Amino acid sequence: MTTPTKLTVLAWLRAGALTFLVATQLISAIQARPLDAERLRRPGNRRLIDALVAIAGERVQRGALERWLIDASEALVRARALALLPTNTIFAGLHSHQNWGLFLLTHSVGFRMHIDTRRASETDWVNVYRADQVDGLMLERVLCYRRIRGLYHVHALRGPGLQYAGFVDWLARRLFAADGSLAAVRLRMERIDLSDVTRPPRSAGFEHEQSRLREQLGP
């Protein structure tokens, strides 16, 4: 029987430590907040639930499926907290606050698009699109396409690109063509503060507002 050398033992210890670290970080990447009724009402989640109901047919009712998803997410969050409990003391003692997460942003600031419309007989704006929350005109399918997103993307430091104004023109023409009673279209970007990962994102106001009147764009 071959006696393991010092280098072999160190290699196994290193591999074990890396495996432990990766497994811990994969668990910590699970969402720490469970689903709730408000989040299930978002357009993207609604489409997913519609697809699941369509696949299951009459065997599953929508309300029962939503309750199961909420209960399952709560159980998953509890399991996450229980699995990470032994490691909290270790990472706290090492003063290590770095962790992995799914879909991490490179900045502490994000932007949420708002689209509002106004009719000729009205003075108040009506919100018809708010990213991942309101989609009264079914715009998300187009706006989430990656090449379209590149046109209205707002950099946290440099602001929007040169295509931003042209995108607003295109969007306004599209909405005016779909509804002849609209007189104006407005697009705004809501700055979202993501700097504190322990708290929900908060609004920091609106920026990069542009509006278009029907007569400005012509036929």
Image (tube, rainbow, N blue to C red):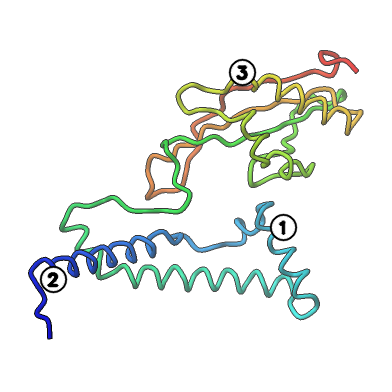
**If you read the primary sequence from the N terminus, does the residue marked by circle 3 or circle 1 appear first?**
1
| Amino acid on which the number 1 mark rests in the picture | Arg
Q: Seen in the image, is 138 located left or right of residue 190?
A: right
SS at mark 1 in the image: helix
**Inter-mark Cα distance, 3 to 2:** 58 Å
Q: Seen in the image, is 204 located left or right of residue 173?
A: left
Establish if 34 lies above or below 183. Answer: below
Mark 3 — residue? Answer: 162
Residue depicted at 16% across the width and 55% down the height? 94
Q: Seen in the image, is 62 located left or right of residue 194?
A: right
**Inter-mark Cα distance, 2 to 1:** 52 Å
**Inter-mark Cα distance, 3 to 1:** 33 Å
The residue mark sitting in front, 3 or 2, is 2
| Rendering coords of residue 91 (x, y %) | 22, 59
| Amino acid on which the number 2 mark rests in the picture | Val
| Rendering coords of residue 212 (x, y %) | 76, 19
**If you read the primary sequence from the N terminus, does the residue marked by circle 2 or circle 1 appear first?**
2
Residue depicted at 60% across the width and 56% down the height? 39
Mark 1 — residue? Answer: 47
| Amino acid on which the number 3 mark rests in the picture | Leu
Q: Name the quadrant containing residue 20.
A: bottom left
* Label 3 crowd (10 A; few <14 / some 14-19 / many >=20): few
Mark 2 — residue? Answer: 9
Instruction: Tell me the quarter of the image containing the N terminus.
Output: bottom left
- In the rendered image, the residue lying farthest to the bottom is 1
| Rendering coords of residue 168 (x, y %) | 71, 24
Instruction: Tell me the quarter of the image containing the C terminus.
Output: top right
Residue depicted at 66% across the width and 35% down the height? 147
173 or 127: nearer the eye? Answer: 173
**If you read the primary sequence from the N terminus, does the residue marked by circle 3 or circle 2 appear first?**
2
